[in-house]
Image: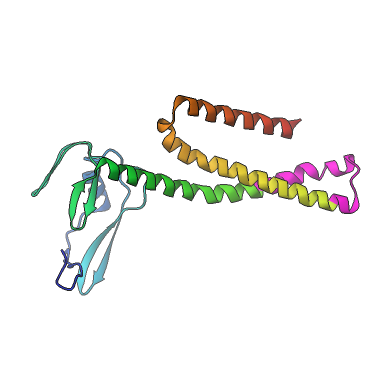
Amino acid sequence: MIDATGSRKLYDVGDKLPTERNIRDWVDAACDTPLDIECFQEKIDGKNLFIISIPPSPYLRETTKQLETPSQTFSQHVSLIRHNESIFPASKKERDVIRNAKEKYFASQQQVPAKFLGAILGIFLGGAFYGPNTEKLGIQGWLAVIGTIVSLCVGAGTGWVLGKLMSDVFEIRMRWHKFSKMKQIGLITFTVVIIIIYGVLIFR
């Protein structure tokens, strides 16, 4: 509820509060994916508040049964969203927007570590493969230094690209069912070819 000043009214929750397990059991009984929540208490303006925090999740949850409330009935297989102070079933367009936003968010969370880790691994591999071969190739002096720098840069760049590709696996997995058969075959073929090429380069 919003008061005359435009602020949300606060209500003291008292002492008898549900546990996180209670809330999870209630929600999971009507939801298709287990819910992760965090509960804690805060005191604001002299009122004890019970706060339920829901961390970001890649899932778009749906009801698994019909829900009856004092003011409204929600059917099975709907996703609920909030408009101002009310709860409504999400339209197909709203569901698509939410699903796409979740996919982009979690894909971006996967990308940064994978790219940097790939670059670091590439630097080590570049140095490991180039260093022992300098004497075999007769490379000495400044040429050896320049060659080392180039090999490290190439290794870092290659690792960065591979890390980016690996991070995209998360997004591809979420969208896989939307791809056509030809696109699925193309992605699988591309992955196999890349693995073979790098295997030949490394173990030749």
Quarter the N terminus occupies: bottom left
* Residue 92 image point, x, y percent: 27, 40
Q: Does 116 sit left or right of 31 as displayed?
A: right
Most extreme residue toward the left, as rendered? Answer: 70
Quarter the C terminus occupies: top right
| 44 over 130 or under it: above or below | below
Q: Does 155 sit left or right of 52 as displayed?
A: right
| 160 over 204 or under it: above or below | below
Answer whether residue 166 is magenta in the image: no
* Residue 106 image point, x, y percent: 43, 47
At 50% from the left and 47% from the top, the residue drawn is: 110
* Residue 41 image point, x, y percent: 26, 64
- Kindly tell me whether residue 60 is visible in this rendering: no
* Residue 53 image point, x, y percent: 30, 56
Depth check: give the residue in front, 57 or 102.
Answer: 102
Depth check: give the residue in front, 173 or 136.
Answer: 173
Kindly report the secondary structure that dominates the magenta region of the rendered protein.
helix
Residue extent of the magenta highlight: 121-144
Depth check: give the residue in front, 4 or 134.
Answer: 4
